[in-house]
Amino acid sequence: MKLSNKTIKLITDATQLACILQIDGIILDSDGIRGYNDEEGVIIAALEDFNFEFEILGLARLQNLKNKLNLLKSLDSVQVEAVPKSNNQDIIEKLAFKSGKIDFSFRCALPKTIKDIPKKVLNKKPNFYIDVTQEDVASIIQGTTTIRSANMIIEADANQVKFKFSDDTGDLLNYTPETELGICGDDKELSLVVNLKKMLPIFRIAAQSEKFRLNILRNNIVYVSVNDLDIFVIAEV
């Protein structure tokens, strides 16, 4: 079966993002797109029915797929055929890509071998939110190189937001962005420890837009939307 340009773009975007977040596999079906890095507590999801041409598709070895996708100069001219198993038409065995002089195939994974998440139960209603600009992300990156810190502390109230860095020697660095804390719940003050190893890659890709919204949900779960894909970072215990 031939895949639409919309499906090809969704596969490409999800693969690129999953590789950045070190997510090993993604599932695409009538419930949407889902991937989970269990060790780091990072989820990507787009939970809606995209009317995919297939019933279900499992993709693993995503770095390998990403490397192959990088051979394609433009998605506009790409043709992709989803080839089902000969003995089970519901299971996609491989994707066959063709663009100009280049063609390649990629063997798919059994969806049951990919760690899934509960579907349609992700509550995206924030307790707080902060609008973060490209300048803010550049300053955060500069802060991490100036102060060798594994974490960043976000402290905020209705008057001010601060990004705070500290290292093992006790040196401190604070950055105050030109933004306000959006308060959606009963709590009026925010204190959140952000693991920079997890969040910096997300900040970098989200900052490709002029600005993005950093949402803090219940239990200090961080939620960011990138290219119509939702990223959830589970708070460390």
Image: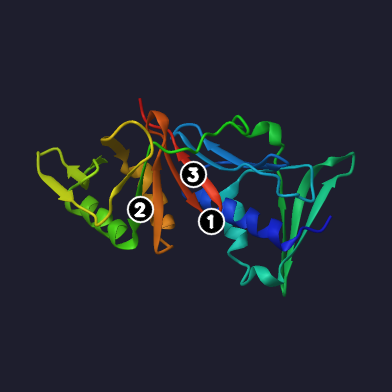
Q: Position of residue 5 (x, y in %)?
A: 71, 63
Q: Nearer the viewer, residue 50 or 205?
A: 50
Report which quarter residue 116 is drawn in.
Answer: top right
Residue at the bottom extreme of this rendering = 100
Q: CA distance from mark 3 to mark 1?
A: 10 Å
Residue displayed at 52% across by 46% down: 230
The label number, if any, that marks residue 131 in the structure image? 2
Q: Which residue is mark 1?
A: 227
Counting other residues with Cα less than 10 Å from the Cα at mark 1, is it few (<14), some (14-19), or many (20 or more)?
A: few
Q: Is residue 230 left or right of residue 221?
A: right
Residue displayed at 69% across by 31% down: 112
Counting other residues with Cα less than 10 Å from the Cα at mark 3, is it few (<14), some (14-19), or many (20 or more)?
A: many
Which residue type does callout 2 highlight? Answer: Asp
Q: Is residue 71 above or below residue 61?
A: below
Q: Is residue 24 above or below residue 99?
A: above
Q: Position of residue 122 (x, y in %)?
A: 54, 34
Which residue type does callout 1 highlight? Answer: Asn
Q: Nearer the viewer, residue 50 or 165?
A: 50
Q: Which residue is mark 3?
A: 231
Q: CA distance from mark 1 to mark 2?
A: 17 Å
Report which quarter residue 158 is drawn in.
Answer: top left
Q: Is residue 213 above or below residue 236?
A: below
Q: CA distance from mark 2 to mark 3?
A: 16 Å
Q: Is residue 19 left or right of residue 220?
A: right
- The first of marks 2 and 3 along the sequence is 2
Mark closer to the observer (2, 3): 2
Mark closer to the observer (1, 2): 2
Identify the element where label 3 is drawn: strand
Q: Are marks 1 and 2 in contact (CB under 8 Å)?
A: no
